[in-house]
Amino acid sequence: MKLFGYLPETLFKPLSGPKKHVYARLLMRLYERLYSARILETPLREEVVKQIEIGLSEFAIRSTGELSEGDPEEDQTTSQAHYLAYYRLRDTGWLTEETEKWRTYVDMNPDAFMVLGAITDFGNSRVRVAGAVVDVKNNLEAANREPETMAQGLANAHDTALRFARSMRRILAGMREIEDRILGNPNAAAILRTFFQDFVDGLLIADYKQLKTSNNPYRHRRTIASLAGDMLADAERIGKIARAYIEQGVMAPGATVATAEERVIAELEKIKSVFEDVGPFMDKIEDFRDRLERRIRTTVHYMDVMGEGAAERIVRLIEQLSKIGTDEVEIRLRSPDVGLPITSLALYTPPPPKAPPERTRFKVPKQDPYLRAYVQATTEFDRMVRVSDQKLLEFARRHMQGRDAVSSSEIEIESIPDLFAYRAIPNLAAVGRSVRLGEFTITLEEGRTTNDWIDVTAFRIDRTRTTADAA
């Protein structure tokens, strides 16, 4: 099966464990918020981790223990739940990291991206018949009008016709399933709720009412079937489309004209048969809908007649109250114990009309006295967090005083500038695993370093030995 040749073997591991629902929602969140919404832009790792953190907070997951799946080695990788989820998605093949200069970008596996796209399409369960008819008609007319240049239109029309036929078949199968679910429920309210939610809103064709109008594109189904029949009878046009299939790469390399013509004929016959059969199929759906609505009306009617009504319940209640002594009956009223209004003061009095607004002169608002301080504070903050080579060198010199080497786990972060410098140092050596910084050499090590501030790739700073030092 080709599926296992394209996808990583560990891809579905997060979706088969105890936390499969959490990872499924996280993947859909990343797909919708980052990757499908920004097709040409690869997000930074910080953005991906932030989306995972927000998603976990919505699921009320705060610690790694709530996200643990029983693997002690995996649980010890980090003490933060969002990083644990990120590493698990990265290690199982959903996410791939790419380092550019000192930034780490995270992309989604292309085959996994297509899988999520197909899963997202499952949510759109309703079918737009008119849209499918228009798509097939336009593509088929283009291929018939310009067979040498628009031959791809026939292949597109064939694919759309196949999806349309499968969707219609799924609708009929789904209606039978919902009929069993509705009529097997003994509760009248649940029957009506299931009918309107599952059948009318969820399964019925999205533009079903518009199909009954005279100018709906659904009327072109006969034109499509007739046009496909005319193209089948035109051997010259079939030959042009077949040669265009070979030239445009629609057919596999090495295919002959005869093979291409067979495919063209098969596609035209399929389109013709689909749109010749869609009329009776729509009639079958209409008959099924009418029958289901009649059965629901009848079922709800007889359930109300056979069940206990309000009158019967009141009679039964009065009979039970008559058997109790008057001293034992306590009646509590919902309304306060007050008398009826007996004066005009207790009646509703409409509010007086509002007075017109007073005339005032427009005044130019004064400048906010805190604006200058705000601009100065934001400027100072930007200057503080901006990382440069000189700041990195000063950071390294401060922690290398009297030392020849220091590891990332030995460095203490004391301020915000230290945090940004500490985070940027391993990114400098991300490409070659080692880089020169002034009189020091930065080398990446195996594993990661975690402290109260951040979780980064482990690194080591060594003082570079020169000829003068050796002497």
Image: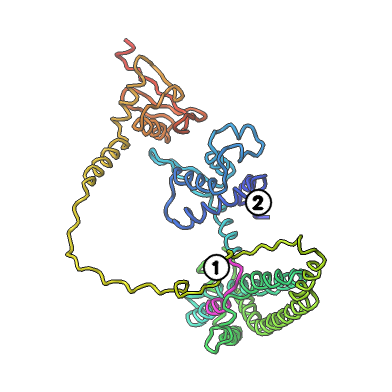
Question: Residue at label 2?
Answer: 4
What type is the residue that disc 2 sits on?
Answer: Phe
| Other-residue count near label 2 (Cα within 10 Å), few / some / many at <14 / 14–19 / ≥20 | few
Residue 434 is left or right of residue 65, and the answer is: left
Q: Please tell me whether residue 126 belongs to the stretch shown in magenta.
A: yes
Can you say which quadrant of the picture contains the C terminus?
top left
Q: Which residue appears farthest toward the top when viewing the image? A: 471
- Marker disc for residue 188: none
Mark closest to the chain's N terminus, 1 or 2: 2
Q: Are marks 1 and 2 in contact (CB under 8 Å)?
A: no
Residue at (22, 49) in percent of width and height: 368
Residue 174 is left or right of residue 408, and the answer is: right
Which element carries disc 1, helix, strand or loop? loop
Residue 234 seen by the camera: no
Q: Please tell me whether residue 65 belongs to the stretch shown in magenta.
A: no
| Residue 367, x across and y down, in percent | 19, 51
> Of residues 261 and 406, which is closer to you in this image?
406
Residue at (78, 67) in percent of width and height: 321
Question: Residue at label 1?
Answer: 250
Can you say which quadrant of the picture contains the N terminus?
bottom right
What's the magenta region? 124-136
